[in-house]
Amino acid sequence: MPEHTPLGKKDISAPPSRRWLRWLRDLALLALVFFAVQWWQSRELVVGSAPPLNGLLLDGTPFQLDPSAGPYLVHFWATWCPICKLQQGSIASIAEDQSVMTVALASGSAEEVAEYLRDEGVGMPVLLDDEGALAATWGVQGVPASFVIATDGNIAYAGKGYSSEFGLRLRLWWAD
C-alpha cells in the first residue's frame, strides 16, 4: 500500500517516469481547456471568404482590403479595451513589416483615435467603425478580434482575445 504524504511535502516515492507522465497529462488537459475556450470565444467570427473591408482611414484616405497584397492581418480593437491596450504594441510592430489593417470599434472620432494613438506612442493604419457595421459584417461581438487573410481572400485564422505577436506572425507566415 502506498504511504500518504503530509500536506506540503513532495511525493518522492513516485518514479520520475510517472511524474513526467502526470505532468504531460496535466499539460495536455490544460492545452485542451485553453483551445476549447479559444474555440468558444471565436465561434461567432466569420470563416471562409473574407467579407469586404473598406472605409476611410484616420487621415481621410479611402481604403479597401486587397487580399492579394497579403497575407493581411485585420485586427478589431477599441480605445476603452484593456486587453487591446496590452496588445497594441505587438500589432503596431507587426504593421511595420506586414500588411495590417486595424479597425477601431466604438472608439470616438478620427481626431480622438489619432490622439489616443499619439498618446500611446503607437502608429498603425486604422479604420473607424463607430456604429459597429464592419464588426457586424465580420461577426465581431467583442474585442480584440484578429483575422489573418490569405492571398486567396480566405480567412486563414480568426480569433478573439489576446494573441501574442509571435502567434500572429506565425499565423501570417502560415497563410503566405
Image (cartoon, rainbow, N blue to C red):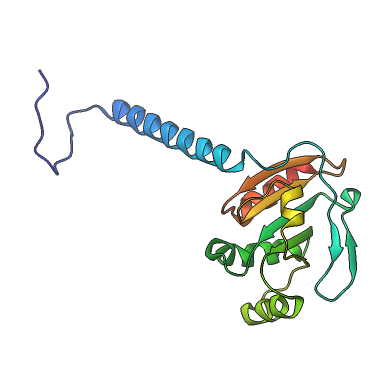
Closer to us: 85 or 165: 85
Question: Relative to 79, is 150 on the left or the right?
Answer: right
Determine the image quadrant of residue 164. bottom right
> What percent of the width, then of the height, locates residue 18?
30, 26
Quick check: can you spot residue 132? yes
Task: Note whether 6 is above or below 94 in the view shown.
Answer: above
Task: Note whether 107 is above or below 7 in the view shown.
Answer: below
- Which residue is painted at 62% across and 38% down in the image? 43
Determine the image quadrant of residue 48. top right
Question: Relative to 136, is 28 on the left or the right?
Answer: left
Which image quarter holds the C terminus? Answer: top right
Extreme-front residue of the structure:
131
Determine the image quadrant of residue 118. bottom right
> What percent of the width, then of the height, locates residue 3?
9, 26
> What percent of the width, then of the height, locates residue 168?
66, 51
- Which residue is painted at 77% across and 55% down in the image? 134
- Which residue is painted at 63% across and 50% down in the image? 141
Extreme-top residue of the structure:
1
Task: Note whether 127 is above or below 162 in the view shown.
Answer: below
Task: Note whether 29 is above or below 147 in the view shown.
Answer: above
> What percent of the width, then of the height, locates residue 92?
69, 66
- Which residue is painted at 49% across and 40% down in the image? 34
Question: Relative to 14, is 85 on the left or the right?
Answer: right
Closer to us: 35 or 167: 35
Closer to us: 61 or 5: 61
Number of numbered markers: 0
Quick check: can you spot residue 98? no
Question: Relative to 160, is 71 on the left or the right?
Answer: right
Which image quarter holds the N terminus? Answer: top left
